[in-house]
Image (tube, grey):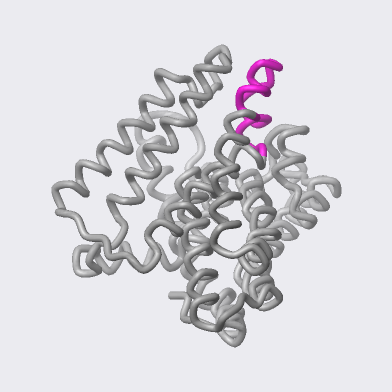
């Protein structure tokens, strides 16, 4: 999730800078229209679909308050208060958080320029760690109170934006061996953050300094993984992996509903269940995300292209 926030901020910041360089300004209204057309149809469609499924299956009931929280892009804040939803929208809190960041980011780029972007991105990091430290001292649980807090996760957006500002108009090429080292090191840092610094926070006592340092380790790991893949030759990536990147939004949105479908299709426990259920979940997720991309998302993407001032792919 943290890597996703970092990558998302990098991409959007880079596109905003390119638009400013190419057109001499940033069209904030067009930016919002593009975001709405890319994110909202599938996001809101799944939210309302889950609500109606909950009317038929009480176990997955989604209250009107939950729906309102997601519709008004406050799903992460309500999750922090009420806990993770029992419905299959549980993972969509991150979409609310992402959209909050982008409500203000293009305006900062338009009216403040590169310097304002750098200052604001830099400020997200100490603010994020300060909030982590404060919430830990207050005894708040990592999940979901700290983990879904906008100010905590904004630090990863800030890192992504700073990377975009640092790399803009600069070439980047490193040996494959170094890419492998960065990727392996990033994953190792994630494991250290979880098992040594207790960033997961589910089975451990929350300690302010420990968890704050853990978030820093996570950030370094995310950055290492980003650079391990940044600028990599397309020829080194299998076409199947590139396609999964294209439908990644649907993969994220549908992975929880497909997990529940897999549980229904393969009930019980045992070795074979734990072997086949994830395979079925993965197959269903890829299938449904592919269908969604082709038949539901693409019309909105074609409409979105009309509001582009530079190529976004």
Chief SS of the magenta region = helix
Q: Quadrant of residue 25?
A: bottom right
Q: Is residue 79 visible in this depiction of the protein?
A: yes
Task: Decide if residue 94 is on the left or right side of residue 64.
Answer: left
Task: Decide if residue 55 is on the left or right side of residue 275.
Answer: right
x, y percentage for residue 108? Answer: 65, 61
Of residues 16 and 116, the one nearer the viewer is 116
Of residues 199 and 173, the one nearer the viewer is 173
* Residue extending farthest bottom: 306
Whether the magenta-drawn stretch holds residue 247 is answered as: no
Q: Residue at x 56, y 49 (%)?
A: 121
x, y percentage for residue 46? Answer: 67, 60
* Residue extending farthest front: 115
Of residues 200 and 311, the one nearer the viewer is 311
Q: Residue at x 52, y 22 (%)?
A: 211
The magenta stretch spans which residues? 131-149
Task: Decide if residue 15 is on the left or right side of residue 225.
Answer: right
Whether the magenta-drawn stretch holds residue 132 is answered as: yes
From this view, report whether residue 23 is shown above or below residue 114: below
Q: Residue at x 27, y 36 (%)?
A: 185
x, y percentage for residue 313? Answer: 43, 75
x, y percentage for residue 239? Answer: 27, 69
From this view, report whether residue 177 is shown above or below residue 313: above
Of residues 165 and 216, the one nearer the viewer is 165
Q: Residue at x 48, y 74 (%)?
A: 18
């Amino acid at each position: 999730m943290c890597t996703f926030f970092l990558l998302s901020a990098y991409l959007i910041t880079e596109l905003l800078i390119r638009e400013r360089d190419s057109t001499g300004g940033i069209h904030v209204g067009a930016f919002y229209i593009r975001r709405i057309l890319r994110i909202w149809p599938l996001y809101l469609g799944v939210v309302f679909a889950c609500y109606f499924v909950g009317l038929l299956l009480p176990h997955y009931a989604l209250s009107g308050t939950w729906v309102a929280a997601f519709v008004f892009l406050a799903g992460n804040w309500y999750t922090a208060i009420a806990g993770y939803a029992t419905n299959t929208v549980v993972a969509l809190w991150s979409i609310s958080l992402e959209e909050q960041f982008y409500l203000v980011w293009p305006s900062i780029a338009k009216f403040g320029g590169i310097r304002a972007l750098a200052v604001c991105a830099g400020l997200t990091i100490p603010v994020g760690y300060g909030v982590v430290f404060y919430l830990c001292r207050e005894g708040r649980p990592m999940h979901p109170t700290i983990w879904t807090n906008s100010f905590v996760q904004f630090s990863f957006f800030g890192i992504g934006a700073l990377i975009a500002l640092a790399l803009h108009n600069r070439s980047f090429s490193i040996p494959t061996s170094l890419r492998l080292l960065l990727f392996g090191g990033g994953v190792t840092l994630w494991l250290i953050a979880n098992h040594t610094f207790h960033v997961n926070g589910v089975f451990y006592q929350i300690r302010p300094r420990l968890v704050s340092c853990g978030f820093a380790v996570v950030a370094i790991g995310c950055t290492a993984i980003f650079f391990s893949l940044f600028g990599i030759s397309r020829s080194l990536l299998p076409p199947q992996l590139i396609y999964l990147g294209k439908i990644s939004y649907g993969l994220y949105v549908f992975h929880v509903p497909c997990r529940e479908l897999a549980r229904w299709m393969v009930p019980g426990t045992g070795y074979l269940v734990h072997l086949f259920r994830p395979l079925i979940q993965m197959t269903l997720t890829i299938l449904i995300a592919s269908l969604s991309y082709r038949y539901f998302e693409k019309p909105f993407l074609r409409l979105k292209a009309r509001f582009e001032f530079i190529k976004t792919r």
